[in-house]
Amino acid sequence: MPDAPRLFALSESQGFGEAVATALDTDLQPHHEQTFTDGEHEVRPEVNVRGRDAFVVQSLYADDEWSVNDKLCRLLFMLGALNDASARRVTAVVPYLCYQRKDRKTRPRGPVTTRYVAGLFEAVGVDRVLTMDVHNLAVLQNAFRARTEHLEAHPLFVHELNGVVDEEEVVVVSPDEGGVKRAGKFAEGLGAVLGREVPTAFVEKMRTEDGITGGTLVGDVDDRVAIVVDDLISTAGTITQAISACARDGAEAVYAVATHGLFVGPASRRIAGAPLDALFVTNTVAPRLTGTAAERLRICNAAPRFAAAIRAIHTETSVSALNEV
């Protein structure tokens, strides 16, 4: 049996890191952080990591204190310091991975930022990146030459919704054509728990320079409980349009599910005004809805899933098996 892993969490992800440590029945390891007056960062471990598995928890999204770029920079410095300190393997535990939506050229000379971020992780000698519900899994796997481990949140949501929908007729709805496969997988998992087949539907959507257009629902939601499923919510334009389409077409109730609740800009206002019964997200991003929108929020704890994945990586067992309902 290998020595116990060393688990670290940078200050801005301390809460999530402590939840992971609790699920692992261990403690977070001490480390040093300093930001100098000129804005430069210093981060390093304060315990011996030679020959040990080292894991660093850091969710990469902007908040009131740190930009996403500051968080990324601090994580990279910590990973590099662990590698230089002769850790056996270094794993970045990134509940929410930044820049994942910039995964292809959308116009001439456009950047493929996901690939550039992957190069930064490789440059500091990371062995593995562990994350949850990226926007496009194939892009993640192709962009990173380091190993990637991908967790899915739908088992969390499926078991949570099992008690909510009960015996009601259910339909799983993708808010756009691009998420149809995700909705299908969610419906399959929910159907396995409910013991019956769950149909799917989707909303036609077009994204233009002026915003999102469309809103035509393809599929039957009439007199059913509609569950709108997406990987993340940013400004909430896409998901609230889908919620409204379901209500307009006769859904008995509408629930929304998204792994990452970024909730920026007009998100709180849009969610407060949507015909929505409840919104389920994980804690990969710290909850930050305000006003009446926050009253509809239900948080599913993703930390135990990350703890299980860390344990599997450390003991050389299957991570993908954790994605089964």
Image (tube, rainbow, N blue to C red):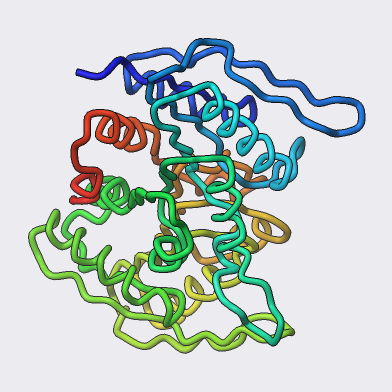
Residue 87 position, x and y percent, is 45, 24
The image quarter containing residue 53 is top left
On the question of residue 90 being in view, the answer is yes
Quarter of the picture containing the N terminus is top left
Query: Which residue is situated farthest in the left direction here?
Result: 195
Left or right: 152 in relation to 63: left
Residue shown at the point (35%, 48%) measured from the top left = 149
Residue 13 position, x and y percent, is 57, 31
Residue shown at the point (73%, 84%) measured from the top left = 210
Between residues 323 and 205, which one lies in front from this camera angle? 323
Residue shown at the point (49%, 26%) measured from the top left = 17
Between residues 314 and 12, which one lies in front from this camera angle? 314
Residue 75 position, x and y percent, is 61, 36
Total labels drawn: 0
Residue shown at the point (49%, 11%) measured from the top left = 48
The image quarter containing residue 256 is bottom left
Left or right: 8 in relation to 163: right
Query: Does residue 47 sit above or below 238 in this rendering?
Result: above
Residue 139 position, x and y percent, is 45, 67
